[in-house]
Image (spheres, helix red, strand yellow):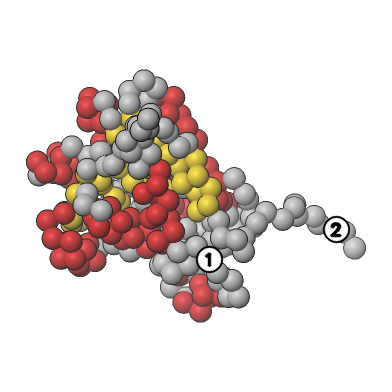
Amino acid sequence: MAGPKPSVPICVFVTGASSGFGAAITRQFAGAGARVVAAARRADRIEALAREFGDRVLPVVLDITDTEAVSRVISDLPIPFRDVDCLVNNAGLALGFELAQHASLGNWDRMLEVNCRGLIHMTRALLPGMVARGRGHIVNIGSFAASIPYPGGNVYGASKAFVQQFSQNLRSDLHGSGVRVTVIEPGLCGGTEFSEVRCGGDRDKAAALYSGLQPLTAGDIAETVRWVTAQPSHVNVNIVEVVPVAQSVVGSQFHRVK
């Protein structure tokens, strides 16, 4: 007897689509035939994606921290892209490695603005339509840092812990609605702008983070997103923690007085 058919999104909204995970996720879904709203601040990058895939990709210039812009973009979506089956909340960033007592409050505020506030406003804008249709999937890109603290992780790790807890509470709120929620928590990932941004544009410092090891790639995360969304509609994958083989958790910190 054949099992349930996979649930394949028809229309996907991806934030932070201009590079890294977002661009790879956009390519993953558009390449499979889905319609994708590719949202980001850099118009040239998302317009290039649209040229690559034609009318399957709708480029939308959007800063997810601008609440009015989020509402306007969602209400103005053209009919082929209006019924969003899957929202991938990918946009996010880390800024700096400073210990808390030396960290920039401006960097802290920016991480909370994008990683938390932007994500919840995007979710709230698209969720009513999914609930009304009785189907949909919210995929939030979290981080291994949500569960594993490290020096200098402070607000970045806390913001991703928020994403994890928000995702689990959404599952509770959406019980019986037919709408699924997944949080994907990557570990060390190379080949994107993420570490360069965190290192203030210092490419050498960013590259040193991956020296001598094989990190994850944006393609690995895009494939993970594809897998969770392709499960049969009765299956919800709550949390996926994915790290490179070269990364593991090693004990606790100890400070010894000499």
Residue labelled with disc 1: 215
Residue 187 appears in the rendering = yes
Residue 169: image location, x then y, percent: 45, 29
Q: What amino acid is at disc 1?
A: Pro
Q: CA distance from mark 1 to mark 2?
A: 32 Å
- Placement of 11 over or under 134, stated as above or below: below
Q: Residue at x 50, y 53 (%)?
A: 186
Q: Which circle marks residue 165 in the picture? A: none
Residue 183: image location, x then y, percent: 45, 42
Secondary structure of the residue carrying tag 1 is loop
Most distant residue in the top direction: 176
Secondary structure of the residue carrying tag 2 is loop
> Quadrant where the N terminus lies?
top left
Q: Residue at x 55, y 56 (%)?
A: 243
Residue labelled with disc 2: 256
Q: Nearer the viewer, mark 1 or mark 2?
A: 1
Choose between 1 and 29: the one closer to the eye: 1
Residue 174: image location, x then y, percent: 37, 25
In this rendering, the count of numbered labels is 2
Specify which label sits upstream in the sequence, 1 or 2: 1
Most distant residue in the front direction: 1
Quadrant of the image occupied by residue 101:
bottom right
Quadrant of the image occupied by residue 50:
bottom left
Residue 122 located left or right of residue 72: right
Q: What amino acid is at disc 2?
A: Arg
Residue 173 located left or right of residue 122: right
